[in-house]
Amino acid sequence: MADLSKTGETLLEVHDLVKHYPVTQGIVLKRTIGQVRAVDGVSFDLSSGETLGVVGESGCGKSTLAKVLMRLEPATAGQVLFEGEDILKLKGAALRRMRRKVQMVFQDPYTSLNPRMTVGDIIGEPFEIHSEVAPKKSRRKAVQDLLDVVGLNPEYINRYPHQFSGGQRQRIGIARSLALKPDLIICDEPVSALDVSIQAQVMNLLGDLKKEFGLSYIFIAHDLSVVRHLSDRVAVMYLGKLMEVGTDTEIYQQASHPYTQALLSAVPVPDPTARERKSVIRLEGDPPSPVNPPSGCRFRTRCWKAQDLCAAEVPELIERHGQRSERWRLLDVVGTDRCGHVARSAAATAAPARSASLSRSPVG
Ligand SMILES: Nc1ncnc2c1ncn2[C@@H]1O[C@H](COP(=O)(O)OP(=O)(O)OP(=O)(O)O)[C@@H](O)[C@H]1O
Ligand code: SF4
Ligand SMILES: [Mg+2]
């Protein structure tokens, strides 16, 4: 697992990553008539020991991003440097080595585990390919240790997935992801299929494992409140692009992109007094199709601050000027030249421009 002495060093750099899926027509003679722009020029970086939350509505490209980073899908363009090496170009033994270091936890603990395999075989399966991590005679012990690490009874090694609850199954998925001692785990909505009470347990487990093994995470979720607990930084994604990236304070207290502000206003507030004071930005309608995204700013069809210019020109992204180094600032985007640097509090109290796509109302 991650070398704890390396915590803070850059582990992953993603530059202008693009993944388009062709849209075809015809059964025998297939013609490409368009492209689904699932990921369309995404850049960010991740330090060793850091957790980056990735948040956005359904269909914005989060899982596609994860699959391309895992090399489960080929990228259309871009560069993904893992420990300085472009993993999009790796083949053979070098690709296998990379696959050991980057693992994934999937959303649905009910379908991601093979029902015909015992838990021992599921968790130990990666050792078949990477036998150097656990030679055959020590495998049973290695699997039992992993069960113990994720809070499951090592005696359960011969049980089948249907004999476990959803939360326990997700623990099995996490144990399997840890088997090869990875540096980075990409968690694609690992708790969204679980009950709220179980979600907290799994999140706490992931937090503990991060500390214990110096892991880095990319943690994908729909909701800003889910990723907050675990994330050092959060990236907000919309229609294949990152809209804003920042630290906890930068995103949760000073969000400057209208889309981040809208997502934040949808986060439930437990305190009734605070809830009454909170104004809500309701994003209406679904995001546009990634086959034919809006011209200019992708968010403009749902943005209450949109101007004519937003349709005519792609806005320039503004670099975040915080405490971060020069290189980090290039990748931490605060918003655009039209709507960046607008403090959330100011945006929340200002009367919104009239817009068919947005309404505000107190939360009732
Ligand atoms: N194999 C594929 N072929 C064609 N289009 C695809 C494929 N996989 C995903 N897409 C499209 O790419 C876009 C992004 O999908 P993706 O699954 O990455 O979104 P997501 O943000 O993970 O959504 P959700 O939150 O619902 O999981 C969607 O429009 C989806 O329909
Ligand atoms: S660039 Fe224009 S449309 Fe896009 S988020 Fe900013 S104000 Fe809204
Ligand atoms: Mg998804």
Image (spheres, rainbow, N blue to C red):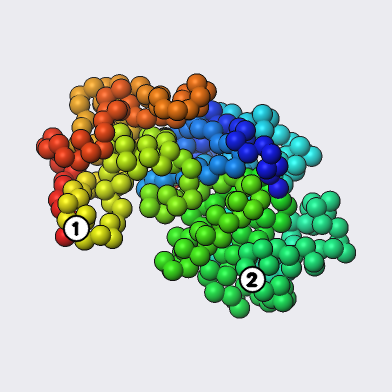
Mark 2 closeness class: few <14, some 14–19, many ≥20 residues within 10 Å: some
Q: Residue at x 62, y 33 (%)?
A: 9
Vertical relation: 189 (above or below) 152 = above
Residue 68 x, y percent position in the rendering: 57, 41
Vertical relation: 325 (above or below) 245 = above
Q: Which residue is mark 2?
A: 152
Image position of 221 (left or right of 175): left
Residue 314 x, y percent position in the rendering: 33, 23
Image position of 314 (left or right of 219): left
Q: Nearer the viewer, residue 85 or 147?
A: 147
Image position of 273 (left or right of 111): left
Q: Nearer the viewer, residue 253 or 42?
A: 253
Mark 1 closeness class: few <14, some 14–19, many ≥20 residues within 10 Å: few
Vertical relation: 206 (above or below) 157 = above
Query: Mark 1 or mark 2, which is nearer to you?
Result: 1
Q: Secondary structure at mark 2?
A: loop
Q: Amino acid at mark 2?
A: Leu
Q: Which residue is mark 1?
A: 273
Q: Residue at x 68, y 30 (%)?
A: 85
Residue 63 x, y percent position in the rendering: 50, 47
Q: Residue at x 61, y 32 (%)?
A: 10
Badge 1 or badge 2: first in the primary sequence: 2
In 3D space, how far apart are the residues under numbered discs 1 and 2 (Cα atoms)? 41 Å
> Is residue 156 at least partly visible in the picture?
yes
